[in-house]
Amino acid sequence: MVSGFPSGGGDGRSTPGGFGTVVNNNPQPTYRSQSPGIFLDQTGNRFSGGKRTLADFQAAQQQQAAVNAFLLRSVKPRTFQNLQSPTIGLTSVNDMGLFGGSSQTQHQTDLVGIRMGYGSSIEPVQNLNRVEDSKNMLSSSLRELEKQLLEDDDESDAQGGGDDVSTITHSNSDWLHRVLTPVLSSSPSSASSPSTTCSRQTVMEIAAAVAEGKTEIAAELLACVSPTPNQKTNSEERLVNFMVTALRLRINPAEKESRAPPSPATATELYGKEHLISTQLLYELSPCFKLGFMAANLAILDAAGDNHDGGGVLMHVVDFEIGDGGQYVNLLHALSTRRSGDDKPLVVKITAVTNHGGERRLKAVGDRLSQLGDRLGVSLRFKVVASLRLGDISRESLGCGPDEPLAVNLAFKLYRVPDESVCMENPRDALLRRVKGLEPRVVTLVEQEMNSNTAPFLGRVSEACACYGALLDSVESSVASSNLDRAKVEEGIGRKLINAVACEGIDRIERCEVFGKWRMRMSMAGFELMPVSEKIAESMKSRLGNGNIVHSGFTVKEDDGGVCFGWMGRTLAVASAWR
């Protein structure tokens, strides 16, 4: 019997048969007529032959109209033009209204919400099993559609024509599979099997869960992440491994104390000998930090001028974080070039201030520098001041004469001093005010360029990824893998990152700020920015271009009165001078 439908009909809208909405992006010819002598009753079952009433005939016609309006296709399998759009695929599936009645909207939310990116809501991952259930439901519903609407069984095969119908239906099924598989398989919500890799995006999704207080979701996502073996990692994989460790320690604080060896996030580790060594190696191996110290030295030399008066002190430098004294090796060499023709050596005083012990180590540093000064014709007077309370800092307590030209070096010091966000006393600003009271000729400031002090947790994680990722990449690109010190430097960077992400309050030791915030803080303490002379900026650029320590990715530029040292467009450190 002829179907009774006009050709070319169908626009993809709902029809009175109740089969919902079908998204139809491409105009298509109508489907072929039903096989002669075969009709559908209102339950979708076939019957043939026998007398029927007019009501039966009309009911069959209405049912057949719904079927044709839903299918809207010919025997020839159609070619899809927009197979790659997962948005269209998801809309089509959910708008059919075939997969759960009132729960239709919830399934749509689950499937679309899984494809979240950075900063997106992660609510849909709360019901992880629902993803697999939706996938199974799609497959079973497609099979049911094929059976009920197209009757692709042995009987239709025997009558002929079933192969074409099956081909079309399987084509649609395959298309839906191709659309949904990337969504389901790429999502971190799919917890059916642990992932073997992790990316920055996954890190940010876990951090978003932590930031919203959804630690159970964060724990489930972390359980799916497998770290890359250390011997096979590149800089990006090392960054992700450090981040995963930091996030695990953050949601499991008890693990910090229970780990053996101690957790890399603890303050004990960041004040330990191993971390001190790795930090000094970083300053030596990374051009961004090494040149930052050199820029500070040039500012000190500029402030000293030609103050040599035949045996008097050229400059007294007070250093609150001298480390292993590497900065002053370069300073002594630069001073040696200023010697006059007479035999009188230049006199320089260096006072190292420490509140964390290590007097014996600092005295050893002073001895080495003094010996170097003797060889270079520079007389160095080195002194260690230990356990000096903040309120007791003065020229007298530091051994500085009233007329001695004074320079205060704060290179990589302030980022470890707590500010008002940690305690009411605000030791950071208090130290700056005490330094201002010393009336120095110059105060040198060198700091890592990163907004990790008061930034919200999610912003801090993003900033840490960008900054420490660039730093790890610069080390990997500029230091040979055969250099044994490189592994120590990378471990030290990992400890910095882990502490910045995993810890809060007084336990978060390193609190970096960007140069703009340092400018505000220094100005509020009464300091005035000394624009870096063109000579200093040009000197740094020439050192970077001498071919000895340089990779083409390192950059030097002068910006807002400071000298910025960066890697691949990312500023890593800024040196500035103040009075």
Image (cartoon, rainbow, N blue to C red):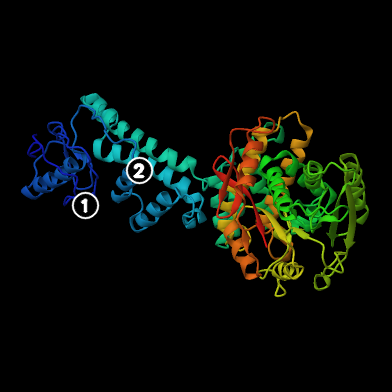
For disc 2, the marked residue is 141
Give the structural element (helix, strand or loop) at label 1. Answer: loop
- Label 1 belongs to which residue? 18
Q: Which of 162 and 57 is in front in this view?
A: 162
Instruction: Determine whether, in the image, residue 168 is placed left or right of residue 328.
Output: left
Residue 29: numbered disc: none
Residue 425 in the figure: left or right of residue 358: left
Check the image and name the residue furthest to the bottom. Answer: 424
Q: Quadrant of the C terminus?
A: bottom right
Separation (CA) of disc 2 from disc 1: 16 Å
Please give the name of the residue rendered at 74% of the width and 44% of the height, measured from the top-left corner: 283
Say which of 242 and 404 sits in front: 404
Amino acid type at circle 2 is: Ser
| Residue count near mark 1 (Cα–Cα under 10 Å), binned few <14, some 14–19, many ≥20 | few
Q: Which of marks 2 and 1 is nearer the N terminus?
A: 1
| Residue 278 can be seen in this image | yes
Count the numbered circles shown: 2
Instruction: Bin the neighbour count of mark 2 within 10 Å (Cα to Cα): few under 14, some 14-19, many 20 and up.
Output: some
At horizontal 73% and vertical 65% (from top left) the residue drawn is: 506
Relative to 97, is 425 on the left or the right? right
Residue in the foreground of this view, choosing between 237 and 573: 573
Task: Pick out the residue farthest to the front.
Answer: 342
Residue 301 x/y as whole percent? 74, 50
Q: Where is residue 34 in the image (x, y as percent from the top left)?
A: 15, 34
Residue type highlighted by circle 1: Gly
Closest to the observer, 393 or 340: 340
Q: Is residue 238 above or below residue 404?
A: above
Please provide percent x and percent y for residue 70.
21, 43
Q: Which residue is drawn at 14% across and 34% down?
A: 29
Q: In this view, does 142 lie above or below 108?
A: above
Q: Is mark 2 on a helix, strand or loop?
A: helix
